[in-house]
Image: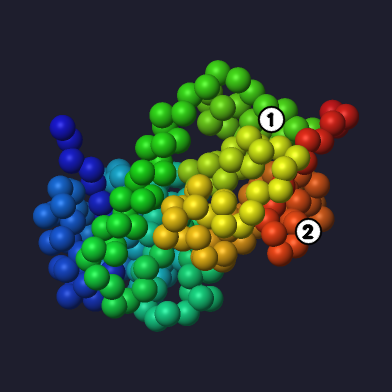
Amino acid sequence: MKKPVALVVDDESNILRFVRANLRASGYEVASATNGAEALAQFEAVNPNVVILDIMLPEIDGLEVCRRIRNISDIPIIMITAKDDIQDAVEGLNAGADDYITKPFAVEELLARINAVMRRVKNIVTQTPADKIKLGNLLIDLSQRQAIINGQSAHLTPTEYRLLTYLVNNVDKVVSHEELLIAIWGSEYKECTHYLRVSIGRLRQKIETDPSNPEIIVTCSGVGYMIRNIRGAS
């Protein structure tokens, strides 16, 4: 069986060696880069299964690298932040990252996060029902794993797609923050409401006509979110 490939990007050589050695010991092929330009070149060259990406990089920072990868790929991305700063984490998630980890970190924590994002992607791949769901101008084609708004395909990350379909499967029902966090990210994330807030915001940007005044994904203040079954739209 072919080993999964991880791309590790960090300009600190000690962290790069630490992560590279532990990923290889865990069964990964590992490519590495020390700056943003090299990271993008390596991404094209090795076609990795997961990217572990430091935010603070020379030449092109990690946030921009993440954005550029997201423009062409749904691959899982885990950001590395230098300090326990929620704003760094939110910026990474807004750039399209699936998760983040804060320096210093234990290898067990990193591997757990990698396994979690890889598992989420695998769960999507194995879901192949042949039906379609229409909510106003939004069409969700479950067999093709696509969301189409006003006839145009919306480019969703695996996390965004799982969140959207989970809400759609509970249409016209309020789903609590905790239920969504556990269902999409896992029980260890049940109090990480910023993950949910950022992902809902990104989804709205992609499927709502006016994201600042959403009609599809409705906020139920202090409780959770709900997808409304919009009828009558063309």
Residue that mark 2 sits on: 212
State left or right for residue 76 relative to residue 35.
right
Q: From what the image shows, is residue 21 above or below residue 208?
A: below
Query: What SS does tag 1 mark?
Result: strand
Instruction: Give the quadrant of the C terminus.
Output: top right
Q: Is residue 152 visible?
A: no
Q: Amino acid at mark 1?
A: Leu
Q: Position of residue 148 (x, y in %)?
A: 66, 33
Instruction: Give the quadrant of the N terminus.
Output: top left
Residue that mark 1 sits on: 139
Q: How is the image coloured?
A: rainbow
Q: Quadrant of residue 155?
A: top right
Q: Position of residue 175 (x, y in %)?
A: 66, 49
State left or right for residue 70 relative to residue 32.
right
Q: Is residue 111 visible?
A: yes
Q: From what the image shows, is residue 163 above or below residue 137?
A: below
Labelled disc at residue 175: none
Tell me what residue is drawn at x 21 percent, y 72 percent. 15
Q: Earlier in the sequence, mark 2 or mark 1?
A: 1
Query: What SS does tag 2 mark?
Result: loop
Tell me what residue is drawn at x 55 percent, y 18 percent. 130
